[in-house]
């Protein structure tokens, strides 16, 4: 009876160790990335034109040197 327990314990231990030692299967393909957001696909605003409307060179007054 003792030999049967030893044999079964050795068999179960071998199965358990081989199961822990095996590496998980690698993914075949990377997951597909989602599409970019809609606001990201629009062209960027032209901030130079906006700044030109807000600040114009004619509004800037340079200090004059008084003698």
Image (tube, helix red, strand yellow):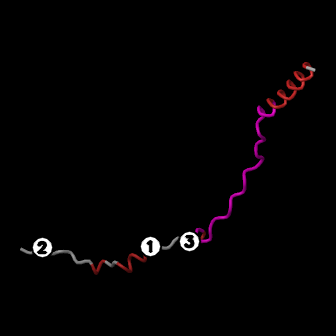
Give the main secondary structure of the magenta stretch. loop
Tell me which label, 3 or 2, sits earlier in the chain: 3
- Quadrant of the image for the N terminus? top right
Mark 3 vs mark 2, foreground winner is: 3
**x%, y% of residue 62?**
21, 75
Measured in 3D between alpha carbons, the distance from the residue under mark 3 to the one under mark 1, in whole angstroms, is 12 Å
Within 10 angstroms of label 1, few (less than 14), some, or many (20 or more) residues?
A: few
Disc 2 is placed on an element classified as loop
Please give the range of residues in magenta. Answer: 18-40
Q: 7 or 61: nearer the eye?
A: 7
Q: Which mark is residue 43?
A: 3
Q: Is residue 51 above or below residue 6?
A: below
Q: Is residue 47 above or below residue 21?
A: below
Measured in 3D between alpha carbons, the distance from the residue under mark 3 to the one under mark 2, in whole angstroms, is 46 Å
Q: Which mark is residue 65?
A: 2
Disc 1 is placed on an element classified as helix
């Amino acid at each position: 009876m003792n030999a049967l327990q030893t044999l079964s314990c050795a068999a179960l231990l071998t199965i358990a160790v081989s199961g822990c030692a095996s590496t998980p299967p690698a993914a075949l393909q990377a997951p597909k990335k989602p599409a970019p957001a809609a606001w990201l696909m629009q062209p960027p605003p032209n901030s130079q034109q906006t700044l030109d409307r807000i600040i114009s060179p004619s509004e800037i007054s340079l200090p004059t040197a008084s003698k």
